[in-house]
Structures are given as C-alpha cells and as structure tokens.
Image: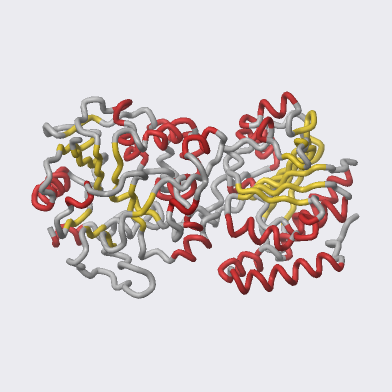
C-alpha cells in the first residue's frame, strides 16, 4: 500500500514557497516512502495537479461561506484525481510546522479516518455553540484516510452543496455537524454501537460519528495553545509534539491569517 | 385573544425541575434557557397563536422545525389551542435533552416528542414520518419561527415532496407558519429577510392566509407568514 501526502493551494494567500517548505519538512520527518502532490488552481511543478472547478459556482465570495471547499475534492480521488498514486492518504495544510518524525501517521488504525481534534478548544464551549454553527472542535489542517474512505463525505457535499455552501462558514463546522459526535467523543467507538455508517446514512441519519481525532499530544496550535484549560500558552513552540498548526487565528471571514509572517520566521 | 402562557401546576413542576436539572447537569445551557424566556420570545409565540386563531385554524398535529427548547410554543399549542401532538426537530443534543425536561408532562402523555434532525437534509415525512403507536402521524401545522437560522424553507418542502404529495407524514396542504427577521447583527442569522413577501417567496407558498410585521420588545423587526 503506497503512502501519499497531499496538500492544496489556491488563490494568492500562499505562494509556492509554502508547498516547497512543506515538501522539505516531509522529506526530513517522514522516512517511509511517499508520493507527494499539490492540488492547485495554478499548476507549475511536476507534483502539481489541477484542481476541479465544479463547486466554484456555489461559493458566494461576498459571504465567504464554506470557503475552503477545494480541500474536499481530494476525498474522492477516483472521481477527480485518477492520476494520483497510492491509497494511504495524509493531507496537510500549508501553514504547518513539523517538529518530529511522523511515520506513525501511516501506522494508525484506519477503521475510521483521522482529523485534528483541537484540544485547545473547550469542549463545553463547542457544545454551547453547536447550534450557532461556530466553535468547532475539529481542525482540518491534517487529515488521514485510506483509499475511498472519505468519498462518502465528498458525495454528501456534492448532493447537498446548495445547503452546505449556504449554511456552513467553514468545512470544520460542517464536519462537526455531520461527521463527528462531540457529545460522545469521550466514549470509545466500539462502545457507541450505533450500527454501520453506510446503513445509517442510507436511512437518512444526518449525524454519524465517523471522524476520529488524532491522538492527543500530536498537534497543537500556535495561536490558541495546546490543551484546554491547563496548557493554553500561545505563540509557544512545543517541540515534544509532532506538528504545530498556524491557521487557528481564523474566527471569521475577516481575520484570515493576520500573522502569516510568524511561520516564516520559524521555518 | 390569547395574552399569556397557560401556567398549569404541571407546567410549574416541569419548568422548575427543568431549570434545576439544567443547572445541575448541563449548566452551560443556562444562558440559552434564559434567552429562550425573554419578552420577545413570548411575544413571537403569542403572535403566532393569535394569528392562527384569527384565520380559524385549529392545529392538531404540529411540527416545530428548529424549535429550540419548545417550551412556550408547545404550551400554547397544546394547552392554549388543544393541539394533540407537537414534534420538535432540533440539531442540538443539549437542546433536545432540555426540551424533554421542560415538556415532560406532554411527553409522558404522548403529546410531545423531540428528535435530533437536520430538517433541510433529513426527511421528516414519507416513510421516515414519525410513528406514534405504530401509526405515522400526519402533521397539519408546520412551524418554523427561526427561518433566519437556516436555508430557505423551499428546501424543506422539496426534501419532503413525496410525503407532502402522498400525504404520508402530512395532511393534504398542511399549514406553514414561518417567522424570520431582518436583523443581520448575528453571525448565525444566515438567512435574513427584509419583508414578509420575501419569506413567502422563500417558502414558495401558493396561498397566503396571513402576513405581517411586528417590532418586538428587543427592538427587532420580525416577519410572519401563514400559508399553504
């Protein structure tokens, strides 16, 4: 089973230096063989692959709702990127700092896909704001899945794109509403016993606890801290963790990456 | 004209227990519970009930879409208008929990139920219709007093087209009662409207029995339409 690392770059927020830096970090911290691709709206390098545009018309630029939708094409590689090799996928945002060897990310139990559970978010606050579609506990800066495991999410988005692009400001909020169960996140999956996910989806269940968080202690946030409430110092390097995420200053469409220079100083 | 909620001994018991249990077991919902009991919350529900009376509609089986805790609306529909059953569809697990606490005696008497559902994506009628004593309930009154929080109501009708056309889970031409606002100060007001006409258009209502505007105690402009 081949390992494949993906990233996505569109627009002009990040130039291709970010892609090169990510690739360099992976070459340094990932010792298992892996393919590398960047899905982009402006392919230049041999690892670049053109992003589809089929969902562009549903994006309302004035509202910036569901603004990172381009990240969701990769969930269905058979449909959009048949040229991509490998079946064990690991996705990274471009604004991450990898501190340590991350081979373990390809050794996880893949019964369910993994996403970053931002433990710097207060679980109670996430529950409190659930109905208001904000304060998501999830962070899609890193996602791990195999083969077509996440294609059901791509199909779900495609089926309900009009509603999803209208309702959800971020893809993480969408994931939280449909694919994660914050009320039962402390209960092991085997004890939840709610039946087969596909069967539940067929029956019309709109919230299935499909995604699971990476192990605690792997990721932390440069802007928000590590674990609520005990270890919340921001702008602090934690070299005993595997990855530092830089995108967590995003609270509304108006405050995208104000501190984008921070990561450059630390590369 | 209905001027107040119907504060029976049972309501007194359920609401006081509801407050107590929420503060004990889920204190993070207290702020929202307080917000659900404001003057404007009561005003909007009384407005709905009185306009239903004015058009001569007698609700029997009602659906609250995104009905939040559903305490005031359920009380007014069942004790104020003799409705037989109220179903509250909500997306929030904590809200569902509290909704049962505050409507406990209705629930114990098979008059109230709350289910977690995204009503724009999941069907509420047809073969997915709610069954009580093995019989699908055909809802006659579909109430959404929080349209500003969700996708336009035409989607609900589209999603339940089969049930609406075949009268599975719905009576023929059920009544829609919809409220929304022009207030855009809140992030979660993703679908504000500027007139009752806009609300009619969003829901693709073919027959309008009432439409109007009210400025609430909190200064917000609220629109309501009732139609089919």
Specify how the rendered protein is coloured. Answer: secondary structure
Compare residues B225 and A168 and report the one nearer the observer.
A168
Looking at the image, is B141 positioned above or below residue B39? above
The residue closer to the viewer here, A205 or A118, is A205
Image location of residue B45, percent across then percent down: 77, 55
Question: The C terminus of chain A lies in which quarter of the figure?
Answer: bottom left
Q: A180 or B59: nearer the eye?
A: A180
Q: Residue at x 56, y 68 (%)?
A: B28
Q: At which x and y percent is residue A94? A: 22, 48
Q: Position of residue B150 (x, y in %)?
A: 58, 45
A137 relative position to B100: left or right? left
Snapshot quadrant of residue A219: bottom left
- Quarter-wise, where is residue A188 in the image? bottom left
Which residue is rendered at x = 67% and y = 26% of the image?
Answer: B162
- On the rendered structure, is B109 left or right of A27? right
Q: Quadrant of the N terminus of chain A?
A: top left
> In the figure, A130 relative to A159: above or below?
below
* Above or below, comparing residue A46 to residue B190 in the picture: above
When asked about the image quadrant of residue B163, the answer is top right
Quick check: can you spot residue A47?
yes
Residue A108 rendering spot, x and y as whole percentages: 27, 49
Figure check: B14 above or below A152: below
The residue at the point 62 percent across, 29 percent down is B158
């Amino acid at each position: 089973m081949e390992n494949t690392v993906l990233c996505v770059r569109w627009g002009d927020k990040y130039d291709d230096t970010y892609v090169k830096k990510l690739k360099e970090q992976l070459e340094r911290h990932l010792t298992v063989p892996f393919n590398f691709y960047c899905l982009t709206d402006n392919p230049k390098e041999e690892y670049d692959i053109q992003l589809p545009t089929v969902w562009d018309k549903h994006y309302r630029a004035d509202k910036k709702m569901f603004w990172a939708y381009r990240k969701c094409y990769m969930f269905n590689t058979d449909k959009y990127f048949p040229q991509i090799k490998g079946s064990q996928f690991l996705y990274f945002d471009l604004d991450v700092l990898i501190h340590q060897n991350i081979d373990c990310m390809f050794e996880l139990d893949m019964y369910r896909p993994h996403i970053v559970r931002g433990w710097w978010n207060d679980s109670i606050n996430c529950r409190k704001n659930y109905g208001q579609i904000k304060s998501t506990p999830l962070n899609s800066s890193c996602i791990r899945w195999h083969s077509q495991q996440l294609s059901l999410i791509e199909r779900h988005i495609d089926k309900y794109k009009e509603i999803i692009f209208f309702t959800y400001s971020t893809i993480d909020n969408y994931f939280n509403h449909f694919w994660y169960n914050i009320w039962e996140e402390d209960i092991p999956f085997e004890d939840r016993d709610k039946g087969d996910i596909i069967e539940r989806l067929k029956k019309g269940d709109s919230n299935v606890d499909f995604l699971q968080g990476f192990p605690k202690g792997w990721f932390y946030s440069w802007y928000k801290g590590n674990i609520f409430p005990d270890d919340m110092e921001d702008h602090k390097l934690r070299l005993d963790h595997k990855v530092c995420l830089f995108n967590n200053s995003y609270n509304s469409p108006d405050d995208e990456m104000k501190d984008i220079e921070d990561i450059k100083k630390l590369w | 004209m209905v001027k107040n909620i119907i504060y029976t001994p049972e309501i007194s018991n359920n609401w006081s227990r509801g407050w107590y249990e929420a503060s004990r077991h889920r204190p993070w919902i207290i702020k929202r519970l307080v917000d659900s009991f404001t003057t404007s919350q009561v005003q909007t529900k009384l407005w709905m009930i009185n306009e239903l009376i004015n058009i001569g509609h007698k609700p029997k089986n009602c659906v609250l879409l995104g009905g939040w805790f559903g305490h005031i609306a359920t009380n007014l529909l069942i004790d104020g208008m003799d409705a037989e059953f109220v179903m509250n569809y909500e997306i929030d697990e904590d809200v569902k929990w509290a909704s049962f606490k505050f409507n406990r005696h209705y629930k114990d008497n098979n008059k109230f139920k709350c289910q977690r559902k995204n009503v724009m994506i999941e069907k509420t009628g047809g073969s997915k219709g709610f069954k009580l004593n093995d019989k699908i309930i055909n809802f006659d009154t579909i109430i959404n007093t929080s349209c500003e929080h969700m996708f336009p109501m035409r989607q609900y009708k589209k999603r339940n087209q089969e049930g609406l056309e075949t009268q599975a889970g719905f009576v023929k031409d059920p009544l829609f009662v919809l409220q929304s606002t022009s207030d855009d100060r809140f992030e979660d007001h993703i679908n504000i409207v500027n007139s009752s006409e806009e609300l009619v258009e969003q829901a693709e209502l073919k027959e309008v029995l009432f439409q109007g505007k009210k400025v609430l105690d909190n200064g917000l402009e609220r629109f309501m339409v009732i139609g089919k």
